[in-house]
Amino acid sequence: MAHYLLSFSFSAAAAKSLVDKPQDRRAAAAKAIKAIGGKLKDYYFALGADDAIVVVELPDNVAAAACGMLTGSSGAFSHVRSTPLLTMAEAVRAMRTAKRATKAYRPPGR
């Protein structure tokens, strides 16, 4: 399965709900991700541009898009962003593929 980093910020109403009734959202996230065919790996609250960061395993980009659509359409988030991740083994394969292609590429101006 492919790995994805999902980052999001809560809507004002969702943030108020969490303050009024503090709760661990991992079980709800895991259930939704499982319904899409994936698995929740990690769930973190964050400081900065995003309120939370979630690492998931999903079957493919279609499942990742479905995950974004599901959460985005709920109204609980002001933004949802999906970032595909590569395992180190996948990154090494990408490096080897790039190395094989170096003779085929000519940088601008050369």
Image (cartoon, helix red, strand yellow):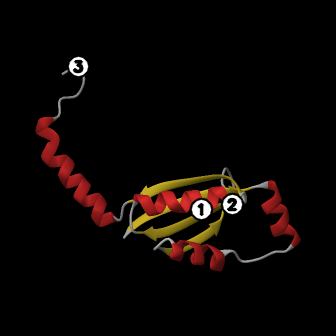
Q: Residue at x 57, y 57 (%)?
A: 69
Left or right side of 91 for 10: right
The N terminus - image quarter: bottom left
Give the farthest residue toward the right: 20
Near-viewer residue (95 or 11)? 11
Check disc 3 and report its element: helix, strand or loop: loop
Q: Could you tell whether 77 is left or right of 39 in the image?
A: right
Residue that numbered label 2 is attached to: 74
Q: Name the residue under label 3.
A: 109
Count of numbered labels shown in the rendering: 3
Identify the amino acid type marked 1: Leu
Q: In this view, does 76 lie above or below 29?
A: above
Whichever of labels 1 and 3 marks the residue nearer the N terminus, that label is 1
| Measured Cα–Cα span from mark 2 to mark 3 | 49 Å
Which badge, 2 or 3, is on the more N-terminal residue?
2
Left or right of 96, for residue 86? right
Q: Which of 63 and 106 is in front in this view?
A: 63
- Quadrant assignment for the C terminus: top left
Query: Is residue 109 positioned above or below 20 on the image?
Result: above
Residue that appears at 25% across and 23% down: 108
Amino acid bearing label 2: Ser
Q: Do the residues labelled 2 and 1 touch (CB within 8 Å)?
A: yes
Q: Can residue 8 be seen in this view?
A: no
Front disc: 1 or 3: 1
Q: Quadrant of residue 71?
A: bottom right
Relative image position of residue 33 (x, y in whole percent): 54, 72
Q: What residue do we see at 73% from left, 60% from top?
A: 76
Q: Where is residue 37 in the image (x, y as percent from the top left)?
A: 46, 74
List the residue tagged with mark 1: 70
